[in-house]
Image (cartoon, grey):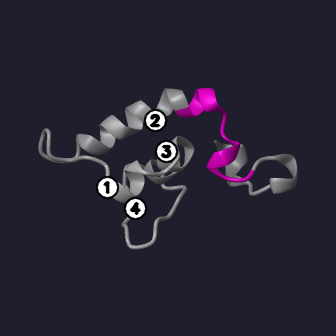
């Protein structure tokens, strides 16, 4: 993840698209559960704008690495 934060597109290290598929598959379910746990049980789902994103972009939003116009940050990382 941190390599992707460097913005080194010439090295293939530029944002969530550069994260490994295994990393995204591993962390996305847990981060999604953390987001859902911040509201009443069964009533706190990901915003529709986030649900339609590619998995790496969705994880990026949950981690505060991706901004979505008109949507506040997920706020999970402090």
Residue 59, disc = 3
Q: In this view, does 2 lie to the left or right of 30?
A: right
Front of the two marks 1 and 4: 1
Give the vertical position of 54 relative to 24 (above or below). below
Residue named by callout 4: 73
- Of labels 1 and 4, earlier in sequence is 1
- Of labels 3 and 4, earlier in sequence is 3
Label 3 to label 1: alpha-carbon separation: 13 Å
Are discs 3 and 4 less than 8 Å apart at CB? no
Front of the two marks 3 and 4: 3
Which element type, helix, strand or loop, lies under badge 1? loop
Residue at figure coordinates x 37%, y 55% from the top left: 74
Label 3 to label 2: alpha-carbon separation: 6 Å
For residue 78, say whether it is visible: no
Which element type, helix, strand or loop, lies under badge 3? helix
Front of the two marks 3 and 1: 1
Residue 12 lies in magenta, yes or no? no
Picture coordinates of residue 43, whole percent (x, y): 14, 46
Picture coordinates of residue 69, whole percent (x, y): 45, 72
Residue named by callout 1: 47
Q: Read off the magenta span.
A: 14-24
Are discs 1 and 4 less than 8 Å apart at CB? no
Are discs 3 and 2 less than 8 Å apart at CB? yes
Which element type, helix, strand or loop, lies under badge 4? loop
Residue named by callout 2: 28
């Amino acid at each position: 993840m941190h390599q992707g934060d460097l913005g080194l597109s010439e090295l293939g290290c530029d944002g969530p698209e550069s994260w490994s598929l295994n990393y995204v598959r591993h962390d996305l379910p847990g981060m999604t559960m953390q987001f859902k746990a911040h509201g009443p049980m069964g009533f706190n789902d990901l915003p529709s704008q986030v649900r339609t994103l590619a998995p790496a972009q969705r994880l990026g939003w949950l981690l505060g690495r991706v901004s979505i116009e008109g949507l506040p940050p997920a706020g999970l990382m402090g």
